Image (cartoon, rainbow, N blue to C red):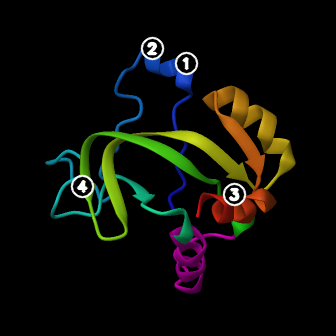
Amino acid sequence: MYPLAWTAHRAAATNPLAFRAVCMRGRANHDAPHRTCGCGWYALKAAAQVLPWIHLRQRMGALPSLRRIAIGRVALWGRVIEHAEGYRAEFAYPACLYVPSRALIRPLGERYGVEVYPLHLLRPALIAAG
């Protein structure tokens, strides 16, 4: 949802807080996620929620074109707040990514040390995941 990039996996060895969420609303007086704010790393609970979530956010104008985003599974840890449809977490890191350009597959796979797939394989993966 936001124009952010995770720190490369290898950087965690020198900075254990590299994957920590920060409040994008400039509220430096609390750690993310905070119950009274929308800050934190976001994740949906179920694979079946992904495509409806994407389409709704695009209709609202809250999400860029699919040609400009990466979608994937994430590992969450630290302080995690559960919501009806998902979670907000203090720490997150991608477990796998789906990207719009084949040219991104190798560089992102090497940078993050995870499997990276072309975006057109997302729908079959979501169906298989149930």
First-in-chain label (1 vs 4): 1
| Left or right, residue 116 beside residue 17 | right
Kind of residue at disc 2:
Ala
Kind of residue at disc 4:
Ile
Residue beneath the point at 45% across and 21% down:
12
Q: Do the CB atoms of the residues marked 1 and 4 lie less than 8 Å apart? A: no
The label shown at residue 81 is 4
> Dividing the picture into quarters, in which one does residue 64 lie?
bottom right
Q: Nearer the viewer, residue 101 or 26?
A: 101
In whole angstroms, how far apart are the C-alphas of marks 2 and 3?
A: 31 Å
Please state the horizontal and vertical placement of residue 16, each as a whole percent of the image: 36, 21
Q: Which residue bears the numbered disc 2?
A: 13
In the image, residue 110 above or below residue 72:
above
Q: Do the CB atoms of the residues marked 1 and 2 lie less than 8 Å apart? A: yes
Crowding at mark 1 (Cα within 10 Å: few <14, some 14-19, many 20+): few
State which region is magenta: 49-65
First-in-chain label (3 vs 4): 4
Kind of residue at disc 3:
Ala
* Callout 4 secondary element: strand
First-in-chain label (2 vs 3): 2
In whole angstroms, how far apart are the C-alphas of marks 3 and 4?
A: 26 Å
Q: Which residue bears the numbered disc 1?
A: 10
Residue beneath the point at 35% across and 37% down:
20
* Callout 3 secondary element: helix
